[in-house]
Image (cartoon, rainbow, N blue to C red):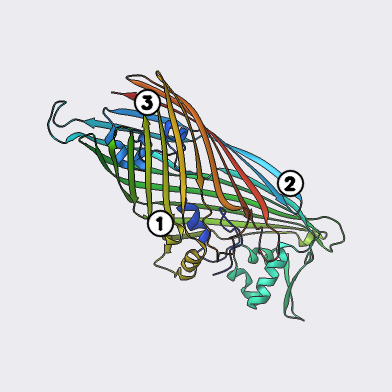
Amino acid sequence: MRKAIIIILFSTSTCSLLNAQTAEDALRFSRIFYSGTARFNGLSGAFGAVGADFSSLATNPAGIGLYKGSESTFTIAPSVAYASSMYNGSNAADNYVNFGIGNIGVIFSTNPYGKNNASPLKNFNIGIGLNRQNNFNNLVVINGVNSENSMMQSYANTLNETQTRPEDVQDSYPFDIGLAYGTNLVFHDSATDKYYCDAAYGGVIQNKTIKTTGSMNELDFSFGANFSEKLFVGMTIGVPTINYYESSIYKETRTKDTIPNFISLTYYYDLHTRGTGFNFKLGIIYKPANWVRMGATVHTPTWYPSMRDQWSSSMDSRFTNPEWNSTQYSPIGDYDYQLMTPFRAMGSLAFIIGQYGILSADYEYVNYSQARFNSTYDSYTDVNDEIKSNYKSWGNIRVGTEWRVENFRIRGGVGYFSNPYTSSSPYNGLTNNSERFQASGGLGYRSKHFFADVTYVWTKMNQDYYLYDASMVNPATISNYTNTVSTTVGFRF
């Protein structure tokens, strides 16, 4: 398995293998940043022991058991993603605006035996709807001068190390190195039987723009029951869908005319990943006293039996001699495979302060090293071994509070999503190791038949990104910020 070129969330765009999936792809689809109703977001998702909110279907389905009536809910969640980068002393920044749906769903509540029944079963509730699990929308710009080497030199190094014959280059590397060879950016010297490029020692401005769009959403079918107002149990059948798009433009331009022949190169890359999976969630909430609730949840691994990648690329070269200018296009890559993301478990605790407020906390355990790729066409042994060695078991923590002032609510919360890398991982120890921090605050209004909530959520995550071979270039330090305002309206019936 080739060494990963790009670190953290962005999959490599220089893969010429048919099975282009990497360990970073598995991590991207294994990390879940739950979203949903504005009330849920206002407590930063710390709802595992609170319940009676539609988003709990995706975290602890026992929460559906706390409903005493039916309701419908709908959430819009527009966001602005802002990313700044630092590469070789140069800054760049950009932002991306997205309009998304946080959730839509309905809860049906029934009391099988009436209000005055002696049965321990007090309510049996059913829920169905959609909850957002991840938002991929972002725009990153990296710009800086490289005075030591060029991406073309990394291509030449690969060809020299693999001793690829000139007549085999384009067939062996149709999506990147073969394009560079076909556009005269990398050339073969028959006298030395070596590959060379014009900007071997740098002197180029390197610029890359990476636009990612799409999301992970889960269709949830849930059942919950209330036993004696003490024990609440629930189950969710989850059907998550992935739609991930990545489009990047990488450009190198000489800084001075001292580099012979070469003026610029431009490399375009497009990727679309999609898939549908399924999982099961089982949860309980127990009330040992009216002022405290304890929750526990288990999520099975999510199985994606029909993942599919489609990708393509092209390269454009410009030289001082216009006759050498060229543009080459790759074939369209198309590959089907399977993915399994990790098992999860959550423990939750909530304190109910009379009619005035709630304090709640969730701890989520997830072992990212359990993710696995599989295919009927190829072996994923190397990629799966990389997943096992690079990722680890750790935890995510969410804490939130809600306070009541007559029909109004005031909410706040924080969340921490830990570093997913092992001590043996080449990415561990980096200052920018994909830890994610979240803070939220919101307001709500509740009446007998109607409720409305609004929440602002701020997130930050720093990551390191390598333009190509990590042994040749410094990382670009990227700081990602997301600002989301979610608004929920709902009706009780």
Position of the N terminus, as image quadrant, is: bottom right
What amino acid does circle 1 point to? Pro
- Dots 3, 1 in contact, CB < 8 A: no
Q: Is residue 135 left or right of residue 95?
A: left
The location of residue 47, given as percent across then percent down, is 39, 38
Is residue 461 in view?
A: yes
The location of residue 453, given as percent across then percent down, is 44, 26
Q: Which residue is mark 2?
A: 91
* Label 3 vs 1, first from the N-terminus: 1
Q: CA distance from mark 2 to mark 1?
A: 36 Å
> Which picture quadrant has residue 156?
bottom right
Position of the C terminus, as image quadrant, is: top left
What amino acid does circle 2 point to? Asn
Nearest the viewer among 261 and 381 is: 381
Q: Which residue is mark 3?
A: 490
User: Could you tell me which residue is drawn at 43 percent across and 31 percent down?
Assistant: 39
Q: Is residue 98 left or right of residue 256?
A: left
Number of disc labels: 3
State the residue lying farthest toward the right: 258
The location of residue 139, given as percent across then percent down, is 61, 44
* Label 2 vs 1, first from the N-terminus: 2
Q: Which residue is mark 1?
A: 342
